[in-house]
Amino acid sequence: MAPAVIDAMSAVLGNLYGNPSSVHGYGQEAKTAIDIARSGIAKLLGAEPTEITFTSGGSESINLAIRGTAAALTSSGRRHLVASAIEHEAVHQTLKALSKQGWSTTLVPVDKTGIVEPSRLAEALTEETGLVSIMHANNEIGTIQPIPELVELAHSKGAIFHTDAVQSVGKIPVNVQDLGVDLLSISGHKFNGPKGTGALWIKRGSQLQSQITGGRQERNRRAGTENVPAIIGLGAAAKLVLETGQTTRTAIVALRDRLETGILREVSGTQRNGDQNRRVGNTSSISFQGIEAEALLIALDLQNIAVSTGSACSSGSLEPSHVLRAMGFGHHRTQNSIRFSLGLGTNVDEVDRVVALLPGLVEQLRSTSNHTMPPETGRRE
Ligand code: PLP
């Protein structure tokens, strides 16, 4: 978390204990603080404060967007849901759950650079498509999807469009008007806010059924007493992005490029995964030929360098990355790729240390590996 976020949360943890739904002064004080945070999030997204619903994070926002829209569409006869093949599990598992309740679902493929071709979405859309959910930026390879073009296609068929912008907010400018979407999910901990916080932007007039029922909080869209300190932390993180986002982004892109070019230059048998240009600036996914990604992850961890082999939620399992698989890479490349993520606080010494350590670690793993991996051809399979 950014120091400014910690400060903002610390300042209210002991003081702002009123329930925002209470009419007394303490409650109203908490409500005012929440409203300020709501305005901050709205400003960050180019939206109206009344269009922001606070949630417990990206997964809940996504569930509310998809399940809430599906429930509202039930009587419309539109029983078809579309998503891309490289969505986060929060989208894929939600579609899977809805498919068991009678919804038909289609996953649109990506090209070998990790981009959804608009023509492929056009092929998937039918008169019965109710909702399309395609992420703004991918969490494993960072690729940015052509959302405005995809939205136009979905809207021409009368479908609602949700985008998972969890990985794009704070990393590139995100404006709901420019994107043209109807629903947009964000998560606080991806832009230096607290974990377990997020929001769903719901375009005014959208039909959506609450998934947590009870009290009338969040304009009847999400019942339950608000997590006031967390929401204030989310608001502080949004403020930071608005004030210093561009400077931070420029610095992080320079460090990411230094890391990536350093690795590709110094370590033999390495390749970048995903489009080099159409991606967010903090992510680098690299394939290391002849290496088991998990082994390299552990070797780096022993040096206090934290990397990931896929999406964090699937680490701990040896499941190959569904993102790299969807890009057409074979078994070896989906098992030998590492994701490096940089952020606020990453510095040039850390980057240079990783570049200096990697050749030796990789060499050691390759020489002790008791099986050889054939070179990855990059062909779609
Ligand atoms: N969507 C994407 C693209 C993500 O990267 C993540 C988290 O890693 C999520 C959704 C889920 O967000 P949260 O962990 O806040 O529930």
Image: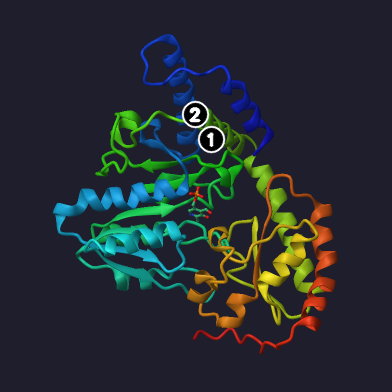
Q: Please name the residue shown 83% across and 59% down the image.
A: 352
Report the label total: 2
Cα gap from disc 2 to disc 1, whole angstroms: 7 Å
Q: Earlier in the sequence, mark 2 or mark 1?
A: 2
- Corner quadrant of residue 254: bottom right
Sort mark 1 into few (<14), some (14-19) or many (20+) by Cα contacts within 10 Å: many
Q: Residue at x 27, y 43 (%)?
A: 206
Does residue 182 appear in this view? Answer: no
Q: Identify the image quadrant of the N terminus.
A: top right
Q: Is residue 139 left or right of residue 361?
A: left
Q: Nearer the viewer, residue 264 or 17?
A: 17
Callout 2 touching callout 1 (CB < 8 Å):
yes
Task: Specify the amino acid type for callout 1.
Answer: Leu
Instruction: Answer whether residue 70 is visible to the viewer in this image.
Output: yes
Q: Residues within 10 Å of mark 2 (few under 14, many from 20)?
A: many
- Does 60 sit above or below residue 381? above
The x, y position of residue 373, in whole percent, is 67, 87
Which amino acid type is shown beneath numbered disc 2? Ala
The residue positioned 20% from the left and 64% from the top of the image is: 128
Reading the image, the residue beneath label 2 is 37
Residue 172 in the image: state x and y as whole percent.
56, 50
| Residue at x-position 55% and y-position 42% | 195
Q: Secondary structure at mark 2?
A: helix
Image mark for residue 234: 1
Q: Position of residue 278 (x, y in %)?
A: 56, 63
